[in-house]
Image (cartoon, coloured by chain):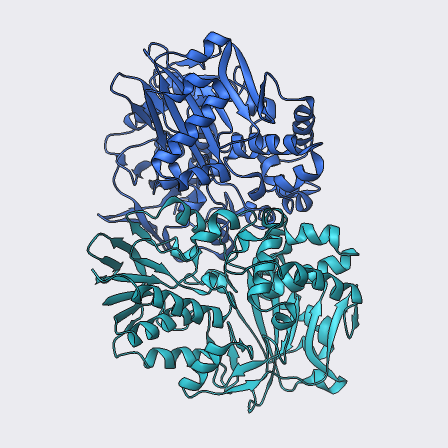
Chain colours: A cyan, B blue
Amino acid sequence: MRVVVVGAGFSGLAAAAALCRGGARVLVLEARERVGGRVATRRLADGTALDLGAQWIDPTQDRMAALVAEHGLTTFPSAAHGRPAVRWDGRLRETPPESVRQTVNLLDDLAAGVDPAAPWRAARADEWDRLTLGGWLSTTAPDPVTARYVGRLIAGGLLAVDPDEVSLLQVLFYLRSGGGSGSLLGMAGGAQQDRLVGGPALLAERMAAALPSGTVRSGAPVRAVHQDGHGVVAHTDEGAYRAEAVVVAVAPALAGRIAYAPALPALRDALTQRMPMGSALKLHAVYPTPFWRADGWSGVTTSADGPLTETVENSTPGSTRAVLTAFSYGRQARDLRRLSPGRRRAEVLAALVELVGPAAAGPDDLVEHDWSADEWTRGCFCGALTPGSWRDHGPELRRPVGRVHWAGTETATRWAGYLEGAVLAGERAAAEVLARPTA
Amino acid sequence: MRVVVVGAGFSGLAAAAALCRGGARVLVLEARERVGGRVATRRLADGTALDLGAQWIDPTQDRMAALVAEHGLTTFPSAAHGRPAVRWDGRLRETPPESVRQTVNLLDDLAAGVDPAAPWRAARADEWDRLTLGGWLSTTAPDPVTARYVGRLIAGGLLAVDPDEVSLLQVLFYLRSGGGSGSLLGMAGGAQQDRLVGGPALLAERMAAALPSGTVRSGAPVRAVHQDGHGVVAHTDEGAYRAEAVVVAVAPALAGRIAYAPALPALRDALTQRMPMGSALKLHAVYPTPFWRADGWSGVTTSADGPLTETVENSTPGSTRAVLTAFSYGRQARDLRRLSPGRRRAEVLAALVELVGPAAAGPDDLVEHDWSADEWTRGCFCGALTPGSWRDHGPELRRPVGRVHWAGTETATRWAGYLEGAVLAGERAAAEVLARPTA
């Protein structure tokens, strides 16, 4: 069987590998000149490596662990020196007040009633999907600072969206899909536990290199997918590729920009209109030393206010310099995006000073990458269904349309939005294709 | 100046006419083989004409009135014989209870504080945009039937969406843009007052015919728009067209499917991911006679339950047969869409029987058109920003990107979502282009 895979991110690469194992002849068409999707590494002149996109691995992410081992790579634990800090009501403290734990626990309790394979079946799904997280917090959190902090931490930190643009149901789905807030927000023992030696882009490159020679064609955006009773043809600017099935391994928002013939069914097309990509800015401040450690701080901070929601030490063992990585989400990220580069730098550094001290004001380098401006990603971390959309459009996430199957981390039921979800989704789509009745 | 207009709906045609008046040489590229966009007329064998899309004109829609006169067409008043009916809690009544008027009045009162040119500037904009209409109704309407009825009437009847998928702010913007609920929901004196003799598609055809010969090229979907310092090129499957400016006169959701080079700025692209098209099914039941009139009813009904939210007599003077047109919106429309044609017909006819009596069970014809399945429209009546999106993405609606200007009824500030809004938006975009500094 001949199969075309659209997109050489982790989902497309995992689909391709599984299809090859199943005996298919596979062609992966990738828009960019590189593989890896929402993963990229930038190396500074002195060798300091910065992970511009997805970068962490959780100890329960079995498929990622297996891929790391299979491709001869290793992981190292994220930096963990000293105490975290929380900026709360204009002051630093070591932990957020108890009201935060209580509010997040409430979310986890509700999430326990959501099946990540069918969130729309939850008993209170309609009620939860008509309520934004921001709206829920405004009546549930015991005070406005707690509401703001939890909104930034959960909507921002997990989905890179504003609490006002995402429904409670979408948040509950995501919490459940990633094993709950403890798992998702944690460093050691959680989703930010480990990093890849050499960076995650290296794993994508090895996954691509392990495919039969010529499998991945880069610089080849798929513009159209035409199918009929005999097969399917993927059209690029340079040529057309015939196959028995196609796996579209890009986010729904991007999948909707491909021209399909026949046109997609109404409900599937409507899904692609209702799953916008998140809005994250990830900024790397590079310093001569991890100065924050001197005061006993870890560099891990979260904030109830200001343009940055969180920071984390992101230095790489063996590097001569220290990296503090900051995240801005949703409306804060969009506000930063509107500024001139100079103004943005000034605002970011002022916020860093508030979070880790005056030495943050003068980094050697400040490196940003805006995935929302990147034509072939258009937002990070992932797509999230808009409020009120789960009931009618959720069931379309994984439903094949003829010979077209859907992968991408947005279609995962476990670790959706993560590299693990991308791999699981790619392998699920590959299994669907291999199970197709052969004509 | 040479200008390319993308889309020959009312907005694109109005833009082209205004550009020609301003001395520009214009080419309109239209994906379909016809003009008119979300307007189409179907003629049955006996001559009965059915307006499948937009069809009504309000007495305050000055530009539409002027176009009708300019192109030698005339209007006729919508049928108005007898009493309307409301299906409420399983029974028919002549008017909804007072609770409906009170709840809708509350919406109008709030809408008075919204500037349709900048809804995000309303004092309570953030609060209103994080709240869905469904959520607002659940705490504001005095009882669940009133909440359901008003949600169906306002979110459904005006935007063809579910109350749970649209924010209060989006609804308030729309109410204000169309002059309030009395204007928007009214037959005589309101937005449903008049119809076009010959159907609105005829006006679109005359608008196209009045342009210089060869101005409109049909069957030419624009796939890409490339701009540089010297000009802009619109690419179709058949050829590329160079111009000094482009007016994109399709809804944002469709505008996002064009490939731009350079890629659109992050916030403009994000807008196209956050303005899904509504979900309406418009069904025309054709009968030998307007049997409902015999009992003193008008055929105008609204319903708090069931798959159909409203019906209206839609017969055309001089036709030998009577037409009852029914509308289904949001989740009800999506539920109908999932059924087989036979099941859908049975459900629709059963609902019609409940609304206008047993004679509704046996129409001569039942004609449906699903704009959500139509590749070049992808939903009706219009696009609506998703909850939480107005503050950051509303300002991008009309902001040009280099040589690319944006039209389409979604960009209007008056009668957004209507033919009038389409024309106003097209003329506004044309004025922007004509005011460009010439290189």
> Which of the two residues, A267 or A223, is positioned nearer the viewer here?
A267
The image quarter containing residue B136 is top right
In the image, taking residue B43 as reference, residue B293 lies left or right, namely right
Residue at x-position 40% and y-position 28% = B283
Spot occupied by residue B89 in the image (x, y as percentages of width and height): 61, 27
Above or below, B18 against A368 in this view is above
User: Quadrant of residue B245 in the image?
Assistant: top left
Q: Give the side of residue A219 with respect to residue B252, left or right.
A: left
Image height check: is A104 above or below B169? below
Residue in front for this viewpoint, A134 or A62: A62
Q: Is residue A215 left or right of residue A345?
A: left
In this view of the protein, can residue B129 be seen by the observer? yes
Above or below: residue A284 compared with residue B161: below
Horizontal side of residue B56 vs B155, given as left or right = left
Residue appearing at x 69%, y 22% in the figure: B98
In the rendered view, tell whether residue B140 sits above or below residue A426: above
> Which of the image's four quarters has the N terminus of chain B?
top left
Place of residue B65 in the rendered image (x, y in percent of width and height, measured from the top left): 44, 19
**Where is residue B194 drawn, in percent x and y?**
45, 17
Residue A91 x/y as whole percent: 80, 68
Q: Is residue B177 visible?
A: no
Viewer-proximal residue, A284 or B171? B171
